[in-house]
Image (spheres, rainbow, N blue to C red):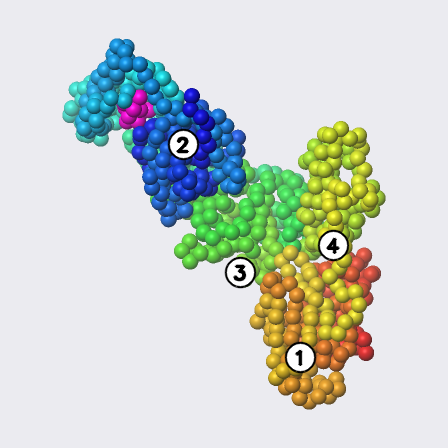
Amino acid sequence: MAEKITLPLVPLHGIVVFPNMIMHLDVGREKSVNALEAAMVDTRRIFLVAHKETDTENGEGEKFFEVGTISEIRQIIKLPDGNVRVLVEGINRGLVHEHRLSDKGNFDVIDITPHEDSWDENMETEALVRGVVRKFEEWVKLSKRIPSETFIAVTILEDFGRLADLIASHLNLKLEAKQAILSALSVDERLEKLYAILTRELEILQMESQINQRVRRQMEKLQKDHYLREQLKAIHKELGEEEDAGEELSEYRKRMDEGDYPDEVREIVDKELTRMSRLPPMASEGNVIRTYVEWLLDLPWRVSTKDAMDITEAAKILDTEHYGLEKVKERILDFLAVKALTKDKPAPILCLVGPPGVGKTSLASSVARAMGRKFIRASLGGIRDEAEIRGHRRTYVGAMPGRIIQGIKKSGANNPVFLLDEVDKLGKDGYAGDPSAALLEVLDPAQNNSFDDHYIDTPFDLSKVLWIVTANNLSTVPKPLRDRMEVITLSSYTETEKFEIARRYLTKRQKEENGLKRGDLVFTKGVLQEIIAEYTRESGVRELERIIGRACRKAARKIVEGEEVPIYITKKNLRDFIGRPKFLQTRAEKEPQIGVSTGMAWTEVGGDILPTEAIVLKGNGKLLLTGHLGDVMQESAQAGLTYIRSRSDLMKLDDDFYEKNDIHVHVPEGAVPKDGPSAGITMATAMISALTKKKVRSDVAMTGEITLRGNVLPIGGLKEKVLAAYREGMHTIILPKENAPDIEDIPESVRKKLEFVPLENMDEVLRTALIL
């Protein structure tokens, strides 16, 4: 018996490659491509074996047949679509032992035992070979599918195993039949199987010939297309597989009569069914019509769910499922109350804007439960094709309705709560159109009562849908789209809110997801607060939930290993469950320093602080700006320097200080792009501190745009910025005076611990920020 060898593995789907057979294969799976590349740099040999289940798409838990083919790569061509076309030649059979990941980990290898054919040259084998060749000759004459030269090439072969493989490769057999021949290691067994298959194929061909003759006699006077149609019917009848197309049409008409459909839809369905009845049974257009009719009949044209407009119950549901967010919940309840009074009038489109993880999607789901409506979510992130919204026209192969109509069908009602998630992540393609423009019709109450999907091709009423849109950054949403929406802003959570959310919801959910019972794991007093303070630094609670989930998984492992329950997580053993803290210190400076000030920034994922450094060097008057600053931010620094030059006398600076020195302003985390005017007073304060050698208070954070005359102009995102400064340990907040009313939006628990200093000009900023 041959020794085991190990080769790269390329699984096949519905294909069998025989020894001495040359064929092209298109390979697209990453592991298979890596296996081919590994073989090319080694022996050029791979192992091809078919899946037992032809619909397997990934490599997890694959089941292969016991026999495959050791093959040699003759040629590899990379296709424009990223796939690889490879020309392979089968060498000989191989018996499968086990497969595993290669040492590199990016493709599979398999242990096999090569098999070489052998046979006894006796009378029985000779008789089998002659019988197989005779049957194959009859099959070639009847089928007329392969040239006679192929038959001649078969008859001159003296290798009986190769002869059987060559004949089998030319037959149009199912996967199981071909694999049975490949798995027959004995040449005699292989020939017997092939003889039986050829006998059956000949019977089928003879029956087909008889059917052809009978149909030809019956249909001599009809046209060719009618003749072919009757031939197919006769074949189906002979095989016992005849389908009555009339029953299918009757079923569609029955559904149309029993359902509640608009007149125009009934006319379209009736017209399409009439066309379908005139088509040949196997016509490809029949499947297109069938799919279109099913979509029309499945859509809930006049099916609505009854609203449960109990505002008290709605408030209870929102309070039960979401902690905090009082102003947000108040505004949602206001809209629901208006909807209860106006009933049939279109509801406003709600747009929930806020950082990731603050509960936008779950709020929309709660609104659906409060109203007793179906809930549908469509993620718009990364969509670049208008057809994703409006659908494809039916002239295209594989055409489908857009996501809007698909969602309506899935809900089974024409008045669901429809969430359009991540609308700010919509893309735009010069060839595929602008999906945000397609949304204008969807979200416009004046137009969406007759929404025209390209596939459905008849107006559908979307005016009863309650639309809720979510976004992280409203500035990237096109203005015409913003004008159609009522914006509700969700801000970052405070540490108190995070603790309550973790205590009430996150720990319970993670225990359930990780198979823990309620009393199996106990977070002792102060542990959740420590996780929030030292392991997370985020606006929402997603990272917090991941860390709690990590602790639950560690506890589950301890329980499985036999440790007694309940398991307690304390401050002392917290590291054993979730590792060392990530944020032992804040990024704020501990001591006042010269040339270092702290700004505040707003990002899509919440607020952040912006430490800003300035240093004065001997030079020729250059202003160096580093830290990946945008154009607006660079202009703010220029404006700050001009203000300093205009006030040089009061600051006791030399008149020509800017000619003899270079000033370098740097904002750390240089890989992160930064822009906007709100860091103007921060950069000006850092430069003034560096020039006057006066220290800046380390517990002060500031935000505001600066003008050439030193005025401090208002900014946006104050709440997010202040919460970030609070998380980083700041005590005093300098802000523009015009933003003073926004202080009320900041949670009271944070306001009490901070000192707010609203100012109008840079002179006041310097008196507060610098240690004079």
Q: Earlier in the sequence, mark 3 or mark 1?
A: 3
Number of residues whose C-alpha sits closer than 10 Å to that of mark 2, classed few (under 14), some (14–19) or many (20 or more): many
Query: What span is colored magenta in the figure?
Result: 161-173
Q: Amino acid at mark 1?
A: Leu
Number of residues whose C-alpha sits closer than 10 Å to that of mark 4, classed few (under 14), some (14–19) or many (20 or more): some
The residue labelled by disc 1 is 617
Residue placed furthest toward the top:
123
The residue labelled by disc 2 is 48
Q: Earlier in the sequence, mark 2 or mark 1?
A: 2
Numbered disc 3: secondary structure: loop
The residue labelled by disc 4 is 583
Q: Amino acid at mark 2?
A: Leu
Q: Nearer the viewer, mark 4 or mark 3?
A: 4
Disc 4 and disc 3: Cα gap in Å?
A: 38 Å
Please name whichever residue, 435 or 676, is drawn nearer the observer in this view of the structure: 676
Pointers 4 and 1 in contact (C-beta within 8 Å): no
Number of residues whose C-alpha sits closer than 10 Å to that of mark 3, classed few (under 14), some (14–19) or many (20 or more): some
Q: Nearer the viewer, mark 3 or mark 1?
A: 1
Numbered disc 2: secondary structure: strand
Please name whichever residue, 603 or 147, is drawn nearer the observer in this view of the structure: 147
Number of residues whose C-alpha sits closer than 10 Å to that of mark 1, classed few (under 14), some (14–19) or many (20 or more): some
* Residue 526 visible, this angle: yes
Q: Position of residue 428 (x, y in %)?
A: 47, 56
Q: Amino acid at mark 4?
A: Phe
The residue labelled by disc 3 is 478
Pointers 4 and 3 in contact (C-beta within 8 Å): no
Q: Position of residue 707 (x, y in %)?
A: 66, 78
Residue 436 sits above or below residue 645 on the image: above
435 part of magenta stretch: no
Q: Earlier in the sequence, mark 4 or mark 3?
A: 3
